[in-house]
Amino acid sequence: MRAITVSPGVANSARLEDVPPPPPSDGAILARTLALGVCGTDREIIAGDYGWSPPGEKRLVLGHESLGRVEEAPAHSGFAPGDLVVGVVRRPDPVPCSACAAGEWDMCRNGRYVERGIKERHGYGAELFRVEPDFAVKIDADLGLLGVLVEPTSVVAKAWDHIERIGARTRSWQPHTLLVTGAGPIGLLAAMMGAQRGLEVHVLDHSTSGPKPDLTRALGATYHSNGTAVLETLQPDVLIECTGAPKLIRDVLGRTAPDGIVCLAGVTAPGQVLDFDIGLYNRTMVLSNETVFGTVNANHRHYEMAADALARADRGWLTRLITRRVPVAQWAEALKSRPDDIKVIIEFQS
C-alpha cells in the first residue's frame, strides 16, 4: 500500500512509497483512509526539526489528522464496516503516570507517551490504517469528508474544556466576550465553538483579504486586522491565542477583563527575547484574578466533544474552511503553504 513516509531529523526526506499493510498489533479496527489533514507539525517533521521513528525503524509514516472508513471491526466494539472513524493521536506512556492512568494522556507528566505520525508510532498517512477501539472515534456519517477536521477541533475542544473548568472557580463566572488571535484553522474553530456558546466573538488576524474575514463574519463574529488596537478597548473575558507569535503573546497578556482567562494554543520557538514589564503584568494578574494557561493535544473526551461540535456546525461554513484538497499522488503540494490557505487536506480516495 502507498504511504507518505519520512526519516525524522533528515530534512526533505519525505516520499510516497509502498509499505507493508499495518499489522494487527496496531489495532483491531482496519480502516481505509479517506483523507489526511496537514498542519504545521507535519511541515516541521518534513523539515527535519521534529519527529521520531518507531523503535528499530528508520522511517515514520506521517499523518495525525485522520479520517477513514472502517473495513473490519471486532464484534461488540461499537464500530462496524462502513463507519467513518478518526484515530486519536496520543497513546499513554507504558508506566503509566497518574494522568495517563486516568485516561488523560494529553496531560502526561513524564513525557513517555507516543503519538501517531509524530513520536515513535506510525501515523495515518497510508491507504490503510489500524487503530485500537479505545482510541477510535466514530464520526457522524453526514459530516463525510469534513470529519477530517475532528483532530484539530479536538485541540480546541480541550481548550474550551479547560477554560470552562477554570471559569468554574467562581460560581458567578458568566463570560460574554471572546477574542481569538489568529484566523488559521485552530483560531477559526475556536471562534466557531465560542459562537456555539453564545459569546460575542472577535477574531484578530493580519490578513485583509482572502477567505478569513468572510469566514469570521459568517459566524456572526467581528474581524479585526488593524494590529493590536482592539486590545486597547475590548477587554475580553476569554482570549485564545493561536498564532504563537512572541510579540502578540506579549501584547495580549494582562489584557482581559477582571477574572479573565488567556489560553495559549500556539507553539513558539525558544530564543525570543522581548522587553516586557513583568511588574505591571504581575500586578494586573494578581489584582484582577486573571489566569493564563497552555494547552496541547487532546484525550478521547475532547475528540467526542469535537465530533459533536462539528456535527452541530454549518456544513457550508466547514466546507469553506478546507481551502485546498490535494490528491495523494501530488501529496507534496499540500505541504507547500499558500497565502490563502486555511486547512489543506490530502485525499486518498478520489
Image: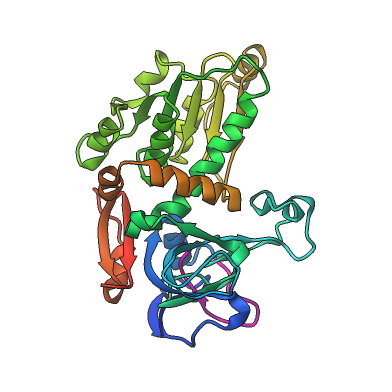
Of helix, strand and loop, which mostly describes the magenta segment? loop
The answer to whether 79 appears left or right of 169 in the picture is: left
Pinpoint residue 228: horizontal percent, then vertical percent: 37, 24
Q: Residue at x 36, y 44 (%)?
A: 184
Residue 120 in view: yes
Rendering quarter of residue 2: bottom left
Pinpoint residue 260: horizontal percent, then vertical percent: 56, 20
Quarter the C terminus occupies: bottom left
Viewer-proximal residue among 163 and 38:
163
Viewer-proximal residue among 94 and 53:
94
Q: Residue at x 61, y 20 (%)?
A: 290
Q: Residue at x 59, y 62 (%)?
A: 135
- Asked whether 178 falls inside the magenta stretch, the response is no
Q: Residue at x 57, y 83 (%)?
A: 23
Quarter the N terminus occupies: bottom left
The vertical placement of 36 against 71, above or below, is: above
The vertical placement of 16 against 84, above or below, is: below
Magenta span covers which residues?
51-65
Residue 269 in view: no
The answer to whether 143 appears left or right of 275 in the picture is: left
Pinpoint residue 205: horizontal percent, then vertical percent: 33, 34
The vertical placement of 194 against 38, above or below, is: above
Pinpoint residue 176: horizontal percent, then vertical percent: 46, 18
